[in-house]
Amino acid sequence: MNRWGRPLALLLWILLVGAGLAQAQLTVPGYQFLTDPQGTGGHLVATRPGTGSATALLGQAFSEVAGFFQGRPQAVGGYRDIGDQRAEVVFRAMFRGSPVGGIAYAIVGGGTGTAGFVFDSPQTIRQSLPRLIQLAGGGPAAAPAPALNWREVMYPDGSGSMRLPDGWVITMSYKGMAAAKGPHGFVESSIWTPVLTRAAAAQYSAFLSTPIRGPIMDPTDPVTALQGNTAHNNTMSQARGVPPRNILRIIEVAPAPPVPGYTQSVYIDYELEMGGVRYRAIHLVMLGNINADGTWVLYNPYVASPSESFAQNLPVLLEIWGSARTAQHVIQERLDNAMRSLREAGEIYRQTVQNRERSQQRMNDKWTEVFRGTRIVEDTLTGERRDVDLSWSRDVVRWLNEAEGTDRYREIPLWQLNQ
């Protein structure tokens, strides 16, 4: 091997993986760059006269800071209010040779417009975000308390567990299904609902001479199923005096591979109103096969947060969502019930129960990896692992292996790590 190969490979590893944020401040015309002497990261902010669209102001800001971030920042996901007076975007970029991520925001009103970029390294942004936001007197909506002191919490009925930070409590659990809430929002895991088709409901109602209480709908498409199930739950909630959940708008529908036993699977990003508060949610909706008795399963876990702080809260919500585990005895009980009640479809149901948790974990891990913007690269010789920017990870491994002349380095996607 060329005698410069190893030093160059190590230098590349240091630049792309191990480098921290540079301390030297850069300048952008009209912007102020604020840093915290007690930590890393920064808050680039500008205020100018004018009113209008927060989305347009944010788009202009992305172009203005391209030189600061060594290229136009890459938007991952975003939010804006109904009047387009506030807009926020989760972004990734390069700063002084290192990958960074954070939140870009724009606020218009009162004759002025403010645009800002709050950012840090992917490894520390979650801890530093609240402090960096306060450098400019608040920036986007006030961030909640950081997620600290994570611990494994068993479900009250013993059917599983979930990792939760301070301030979070489990509010419901039943045979592997669970709901939790805390300062960052709500999480419901492994939630599934038995549903009757319209034809089956008519037959049962005629036979029993009594109305069917459960949800009744055909598995046409996931969005319609979510809307129908929400309407059914609102009817039940009204009888208990619980505020209804009103779906305001569907932001995005992202297809996902269905697991065995299900015909359709999507992630639905939408906004809803409950008790006078506007929330944004991501729902995983899967539609099951129709059984011989006219029943099918609606699988619909989700995460939700107040809309104004959704971008800040989403990484915490996804981490909680992905940590949920169903106890083995509950899985076994599901298998036994499936074999007793529907023997001819037992194999399909068995595969569904066994594979559903693994498939959900893989999907949650892939979402988590995208929002974190990093992937683990392992030195198979020493066992050392480092986080690498997701958009560079494949190239980093290839360059390092070319320098070594062997397949010493490898990527480890998060879903493989959690198998």
Image (tube, rainbow, N blue to C red):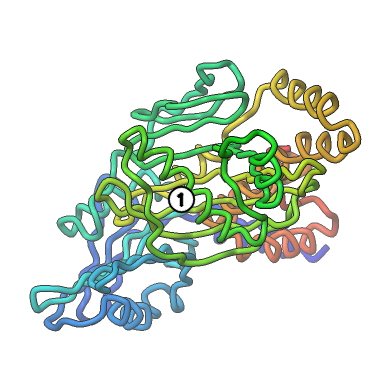
| Residue at image coords 81%, 37% | 349
- Which quadrant would residue 218 be assigned to in this image? bottom right
Q: Is residue 86 placed above or below 209 in the rendered structure?
A: below
Instruction: Please report the residue visible at 56 percent of the width from the left and 60 percent of the height from the top.
Output: 224
Quarter-of-image position of residue 241:
top left
Q: Is residue 44 above or below residue 379?
A: below
Location of the N terminus (image quadrant): bottom right
Whole-percent x and y of residue 258? Answer: 73, 54
Residue 266 at x, y percent in the picture:
62, 58
Residue at the disc numbered 1: 231
Q: Is residue 14 visible?
A: no
2 left or right of 212?
Answer: right
Residue 164 coordinates in the image, percent (x, y): 45, 30
326 over 146 or under it: above or below: above
Q: Amino acid at mark 1?
A: Ala
Residue 419 in the figure: left or right of residue 208? right
Residue 306 placement (x, y as % from top left) = 32, 50
Q: Nearer the viewer, residue 43 or 166?
A: 166
Q: Secondary structure at mark 1?
A: helix
Query: Residue at (41%, 45%) from the top-left corner?
Result: 234
Image quadrant containing the C terminus: top right
Task: Categorize mark 1 by other alpha carbons within 10 Å: few (<14), some (14-19), many (20+).
Answer: some
